[in-house]
């Protein structure tokens, strides 16, 4: 991979700086993503809807390696990129994985369960019908129900709600 190749990088940032970093990146024309979910909280007897990060302290940045390396100094914020398993290069998330991840987060905010990377490997599947059509992942059983897991390799796994077997094809 060349320094000029545009990729998705995952960065760990200080708690509650995600939105400030996102604002900085977007002002500089850099695409980024923070998975949010809406939460209703009560303050002084009033209900307020707030956005909370699904994965606090993480931001996904779509840029080249050279730019990624310059952001911490330019922004003034601490950003640590996640390294791959061999610890020699940053973890890169493919465009397809990122699209699937964003879709699952946006579509089913309450229907997504975050799993750790200890899931057993199952069949690779593609959803061919229903709301999750086009999503590719791994078939797993969680609490007795078939679900499709979208992995951001070395980072996180997200499981959909139940998907009927007839909605899936093996890839």
Image (spheres, rainbow, N blue to C red):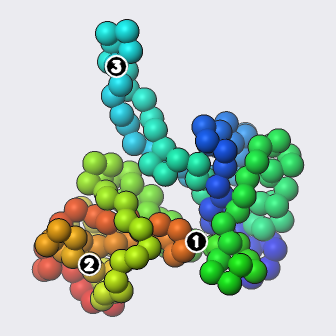
Question: Residue pushed farthest front?
Answer: 118
Query: Which mark is drawn over residue 132?
Result: none
The image shows residue 169 at horizontal and vertical percentages of 24, 85
Q: Say what secondary structure mark 1 lies in.
A: strand
- Give me the C-alpha separation between circle 3 and circle 1: 37 Å
Q: Would residue 153 appear left or right of 119 to someone viewing this image?
A: right
Along the viewing direction, whichever of 110 and 118 lies nearer the viewer? 118
Residue at the image position 71 percent from the left and 46 percent from the top? 25
**Viewer-proximal residue, 87 or 70?**
87
Whole-percent x, y for residue 88 in the image: 75, 80
C-alpha separation, residue under disc 1 versus residue under disc 2: 21 Å
Q: Is residue 151 above or below residue 38?
A: below
Say if mark 3 contacts mark 1, CB within 8 Å: no
- Which badge, 2 or 3, is on the more N-terminal residue? 3
| Position above or below: 86 against 68 | below
Label 2 to label 3, Cα distance in Å? 37 Å
Residue occupying the point 22% across, 70% down: 142
Does residue 50 appear to the left or right of 98 in the view shown? Answer: left
Question: Left of 69 or right of it: where is 13?
Answer: left
Q: Earlier in the sequence, mark 3 or mark 1?
A: 3
Q: Within the image, what quadrant is residue 121 found in? A: bottom left
The residue carrying pointer 3 sits among few (fewer than 14), some (14 to 19) or many (20 or more) residues within 10 Å by Cα, namely few
Tell me the number on the disc at residue 42. Answer: 3
Circle 3 SS class: strand
Kindly identify which numbered label has been placed on residue 140.
Answer: 2
Residue sitting at x 73%, y 52%: 79
Q: Which circle marks residue 93 in the picture?
A: 1
Q: Residues within 10 Å of mark 2 (few under 14, many from 20)?
A: some
Q: Position of residue 145 (x, y in %)?
A: 15, 71
């Amino acid at each position: 991979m060349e320094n000029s190749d545009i990729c998705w990088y995952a960065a760990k940032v200080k708690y509650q700086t995600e939105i400030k970093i996102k604002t900085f990146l977007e002002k500089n024309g850099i695409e980024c993503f923070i998975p949010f979910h809406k939460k209703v909280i009560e303050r002084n007897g009033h209900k307020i809807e707030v956005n909370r990060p699904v994965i606090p302290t993480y931001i996904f940045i779509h840029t080249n390696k050279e730019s990624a390396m310059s952001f911490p100094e330019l922004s003034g914020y601490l950003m640590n990129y996640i390294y791959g398993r061999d610890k020699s290069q940053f973890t890169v998330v493919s465009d397809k994985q990122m699209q699937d991840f964003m879709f699952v987060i946006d579509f089913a905010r309450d229907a997504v369960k975050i799993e750790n990377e200890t899931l057993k490997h199952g069949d690779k599947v593609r959803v061919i019908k229903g709301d999750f059509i086009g999503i590719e992942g791994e078939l797993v059983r969680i609490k007795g129900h078939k679900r499709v897991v979208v992995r951001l390799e070395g980072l996180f796994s997200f499981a959909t709600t139940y998907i009927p077997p007839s909605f899936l094809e093996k890839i």
